[in-house]
Amino acid sequence: MKFPKEIRTYCPRCRRHTIHIASLYKPGKRRKLAQGERRYAAKKKGYGSKRKPEQKRTAKVTKKQTLKLKCKECGYILMKEGIRLKKLEIVEVVK
């Protein structure tokens, strides 16, 4: 799916519709000292195999792609709920 680089949508901070720059959301690096990460490492540690059995087949073919929208006026960033698709392409719209 092709998605425009700039869209006009509502900004909660400006309280009106403004132009937003769209980009694809990517999760950051996981923190090794976070409680969940420490718990996972502790459960994984020891003699033997993995913590949980490996999944034989996946239920879904695609992943949900989340869009990150940044307001051009105030710089406020909001996330647009993920769309399930194989490929998301952000394109420049020429007028």
Image (cartoon, helix red, strand yellow):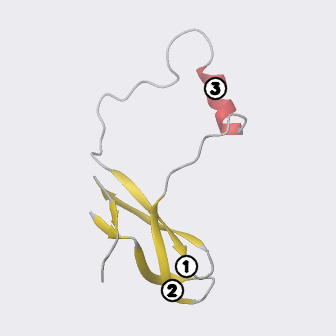
Residue name at image x 61 percent, y 74 percent: 76
| Of marks 1 and 2, the one in the foreground | 1
Residue 17 relative to residue 30: left or right: left
In the picture of the structure, the residue carrying the numbered disc 3 is: 41
Residue name at image x 46 percent, y 83 percent: 9
In the picture of the structure, the residue carrying the numbered disc 2 is: 18
| Label 1 with label 2: CB-CB less than 8 Å | yes
Counting the numbered discs, the total is: 3
Residue 6, position as x, y percentages in the image:
42, 76
Residue 15, position as x, y percentages in the image:
59, 89
Residue 77 vertical placement versus 37 (above, below): below
Question: Label 1 amino acid?
Answer: Lys
- Which of the two discs, 3 and 2, labels the residue nearer the N terminus? 2
Q: Residues within 10 Å of mark 1 (few under 14, many from 20)?
A: some
Residue 57, position as x, y percentages in the image:
29, 32
Q: Residues within 10 Å of mark 2 (few under 14, many from 20)?
A: some
Query: SS for tag 2?
Result: strand
Residue 11 relative to residue 81: left or right: right
Residue 35 occupies quadrant = top right
Query: SS for tag 1?
Result: loop
| Of marks 3 and 2, the one in the foreground | 2
Residue 39 relative to residue 19: left or right: right
Question: Label 2 amino acid?
Answer: Thr
In the picture of the structure, the residue carrying the numbered disc 1 is: 72
| Label 3 with label 1: CB-CB less than 8 Å | no
Query: Which quadrant does the N terminus fall into?
Result: bottom left
Residue 25 vertical placement versus 62 (above, below): below
Disc 3 from disc 1: Cα separation = 42 Å
Which of 64/59 is in front?
A: 64
Question: Label 3 amino acid?
Answer: Ala
